[in-house]
Image (spheres, rainbow, N blue to C red):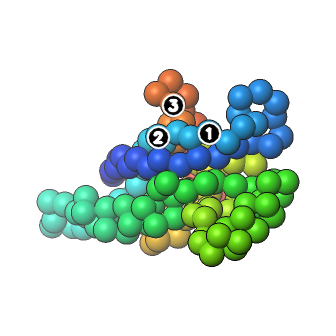
Amino acid sequence: MKIRKSYKFYAAHRNQEIDGKCWNIHGHRYGIDVVFDVVQSPGSSISILFEDFDAKVEPFLKNHYDHALLLDRADPLAPHLQRFGEEEGRELKIKWFDAPTSAENLAAVLFDEIDGMGFDVNRIEVKETDSSVVTYQAAPPF
């Protein structure tokens, strides 16, 4: 059985590898749809409560992603932003990536993080805009 849950968060990012508008720091209201594989227990009418997903996923997204700057550690702006926060005596909310912060890389990172919460994630869809969606799916078993 599959259960689909939807989440949203606001974040800024930039992609230092491409020219054009995405090279600049800008923001999105990201929509995240997570499809979980679940097994219904014999003799039970439910497999898992929806709130069991929300209890882990929602606070994680709020603490690490919502109103954060998604930034590649290799981005030339990274040391400047870190230094700025230190000089101001405040910590900027930065979610660090080990790759450019494309929707594709965001989907892969979120897949691994949510799957690592003890859920069996089948696929994740990251909606960067209302018309632009990336789907990242679990590798088929061999």
Measure how far apart labels 1 and 2 are at the Cα level. Answer: 11 Å
- In the picture, the disc for residue 126 is none
Q: Residue at x 31, y 62 (%)?
A: 54
Pick the front one: 42 or 36: 36
* Residue 142 seen by the camera: yes
- Helix, strand, or loop for circle 3? strand
Residue 84 horizontal side relative to residue 29, left or right: right
Q: Residue at x 62, y 50 (%)?
A: 106
- The picture quadrant where one finds residue 31 is top left
Q: Amino acid at mark 2?
A: Arg
* Residue 57 seen by the camera: no
Q: Residue at x 80, y 43 (%)?
A: 16
Q: Residue at x 72, y 64 (%)?
A: 84
When the figure is inspected, residue 68 is found, relative to residue 21, above or below; the finding is below
Q: Amino acid at mark 1?
A: His
Q: Residue 118: give x, y in percent of width and height.
A: 45, 72
Pick the front one: 48 or 50: 50
- The picture quadrant where one finds residue 55 is bottom left
- In the picture, the disc for residue 29 is 2
Q: Residue 142: give x, y in percent of width and height.
A: 66, 56
- Helix, strand, or loop for circle 2? strand
Q: Residue 102: give x, y in percent of width and height.
A: 68, 43
Residue bearing the label numbered 1: 26
When the figure is inspected, residue 141 is found, relative to residue 24, above or below; the finding is below
Residue bearing the label numbered 3: 129
Q: Please state which of the two labelled residues, at mark 1 or mark 2, is closer to the viewer.
A: 1
Residue 47 horizontal side relative to residue 88, left or right: left
Q: Amino acid at mark 3?
A: Thr
